[in-house]
């Protein structure tokens, strides 16, 4: 039987992050700055000041997984946060575009049905 897990909630840190931080340092940002639990199954993304490096932290149920990508040329696009916000919620399509180098402002979504969450 084929079982496909739903994509996790993805949060992008709106500020720059010191890329020397690892599991404990990034999870402390999530707890302190975001006020979230890093073990809730969400994927948390962090970008450095030059925007040429990105880290993703995810709790897989029994431990943290950390992914790190450094670009040889170019930068990652970030999503602007609202005033006073430290994180931005993005979806898996936006994550794929960020990792693929697509400009989010020039990409347009086609109309789709969205179920209200109320």
Image (spheres, rainbow, N blue to C red):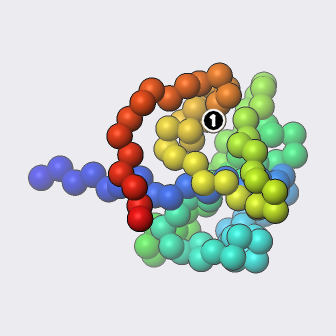
Q: Which residue is depicted at the point 45% across and 27% down?
A: 110
Residue 101 visible? no
Quarter of the rendering occupied by the C terminus = bottom left
Disc 1 packing (10 Å; few <14; some 14–19; many ≥20):
some
The outermost residue toward the left is 1
Q: Is residue 103 left or right of residue 10?
A: right
The outermost residue toward the right is 49
13 versus 24 height, above or below: above
- Residue 111 coordinates in the image, percent (x, y): 42, 30
100 versus 3 height, above or below: above
- Residue 103 coordinates in the image, percent (x, y): 67, 26
For residue 22, which quarter of the picture?
A: bottom right
Q: Is residue 67 left or right of residue 59?
A: right
The residue where tag 1 is placed is 98
For residue 98, which quarter of the picture?
A: top right
Q: Which residue is depicted at the point 50% across and 58% down?
A: 9
Q: Is residue 11 left or right of residue 14?
A: left
Q: Which residue is depicted at the point 73% across and 35% down?
A: 76
């Amino acid at each position: 039987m084929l079982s496909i897990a739903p994509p996790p909630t993805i949060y992008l840190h709106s500020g720059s992050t010191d890329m020397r931080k690892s599991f404990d340092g990034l999870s402390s940002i999530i707890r302190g700055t975001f006020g979230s639990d890093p073990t809730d199954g969400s994927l948390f993304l962090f970008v450095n000041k030059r925007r040429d490096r990105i880290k993703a932290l995810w709790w897989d149920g029994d431990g943290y997984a950390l992914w790190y990508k450094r670009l040889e040329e170019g930068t990652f696009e970030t999503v602007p946060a609202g005033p006073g916000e430290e994180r931005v919620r993005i979806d898996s399509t936006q994550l794929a575009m960020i990792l693929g180098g697509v400009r989010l402002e020039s990409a347009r979504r086609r109309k789709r049905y969205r179920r209200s969450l109320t």
